[in-house]
Image (cartoon, grey):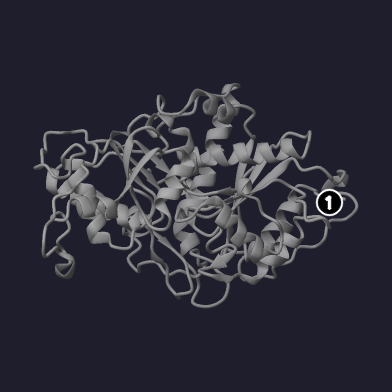
Amino acid sequence: MRRALPPLRALLRAGAAGRPPWLPALSGLCGAPAGLPAPAAEGSGGSKLNILPSFGFLFDIDGVLVRGKTPIPAAKTAFQKLVNSQGQFLVPVVFVTNAGNCLRQKKADQLSHLLGVPISQDQVMMSHSPLRMFKRYHEKCVLVSGQGPLLDIAQDLGFCQPITIETLREKHPLLDVVDHDRRPNVLYPSAVELPKIEAVVLFGEPVRWETNLQLIIDVLLTSGYPGNPYHHENYPHIPVLACNMDLMWVAEAQSPRFGHGTFMVCLENIYKKITGKDLKYEALMGKPSKLTYQYAEYLIRAQAAERQWKQPIQTLYAVGDNLMTDVYGANLYNRYLEENSRKGSKSRIQAKVAGGRGSATLSQDDEIDNSWETELASAAAAHCRSVLVCTGVYNPHTEVPLDTRDSITETVFHGHRDFRFDPGLVEPDHIVPDVDAAVDLVFQLENFAPN
């Protein structure tokens, strides 16, 4: 049962100094000692300690393990507890990040170096990983937006005809004119015409926002032929698949930085200002979408099967630093698991990964390959518990507006437009100082003492 927590407004309201007034002075809470007492030979109530895991970890990366490129000290200590002397993991672990600017193998190599333990690419889930399931689009010509090795990422996911914003700009040099220094002096006719663009895939925040915003709008308002005049009557527009909805994220700076969610806010508002209609998403991926957690659980089960751990995975512990993505997503998925449990059967994967305004999110039921649907929907866990750390976006001493009559949805909700604000979904099951304390807490909760 979830530990009772005060309302979100109380959670965000802190005292002028020290621990927030509602936080008890117990180990494992922000501002208290990070360590938890080592479990005794028997668990609480005399229960036997478990040597095989019936749980798995879903770790966020930014704000939990690193800040920018700087490791968080507790991370390496935590992961020494998660592996045996041969470097094998004692419990199934998946790194669930909303980043999307590199291949899984590169991220796995970075984590291996950072944590001092071997990480495989099969333990890494980028925000775009579920796109492997959207096979309907793999043969189509898609425009990809973001940064990093976009073509390599798209092709690794199965897309056969990806086109970058830069390629589109080269073929249509008159479209990108905000930067006067980049306007072409001499126009040369393109030797090769681009095929019709049939979908737009947003991997993450780009570098030149003005260029990407302009060209994506051009594609949407011309039904995939950006050199043509706008036709506002073409609605709904061609499909848009978006990864990573984080409004902000933490790096080395003292305050959070713009994330891809901020870019999406710009795109949505420009589209609506021009057309008077909502931009629609065919799919929203990355935390807090339910689809992301279903895919992550699939990876957890695959690890358990590979290690031949016979005990079913009953509980997922999602460790993150962001109320609006990590905590919201874990609690949303827990609600889904509990609803399925009450129904007594596993429902089909629901296309609408957004938590609220269905009018702005189209159904994906027909988009997900049937074999993946079977894989993801079977043998689901019973619970997904949210564990909030205090080393990233979340700050237990955040100030709130003095006028407490303001609507909380207007003052603190940083989630995506298509997700309904629900105070219950942003109340974590547990709050701890850092990831090391999170591992200690979970081991104690699970009476886990591996050989």
Residue at the image point whose x is 84% and y is 45% from the top: 51
Residue at the image point whose x is 29% and y is 36% from the top: 239
**Is 322 situated above or below 239?**
below
Residue 174 rendering spot, x and y as whole percentages? 13, 55
Residue 169 rendering spot, x and y as whole percentages? 22, 54
Residue 9 placement: quadrant = bottom left
Relative placement, left or right, of 451 versus 351 is right
Residue 108 placement: quadrant = bottom right
**Is 133 situated above or below 438?**
above
**Is 17 situated above or below 265?**
below
Residue where numbered disc 1 is placed = 449
User: Is disc 1 surrounded by few (<14), some (14 to 19) or many (20+) residues within 10 Å?
Assistant: many
Relative placement, left or right, of 201 versus 41 is left
Relative placement, left or right, of 339 versus 51 is left
Labels in figure, total: 1
Residue 165 rendering spot, x and y as whole percentages? 28, 52
- What kind of residue is marked 1? Ala
Residue 285 placement: quadrant = top left
> Is any atom of residue 151 visible in this view?
yes
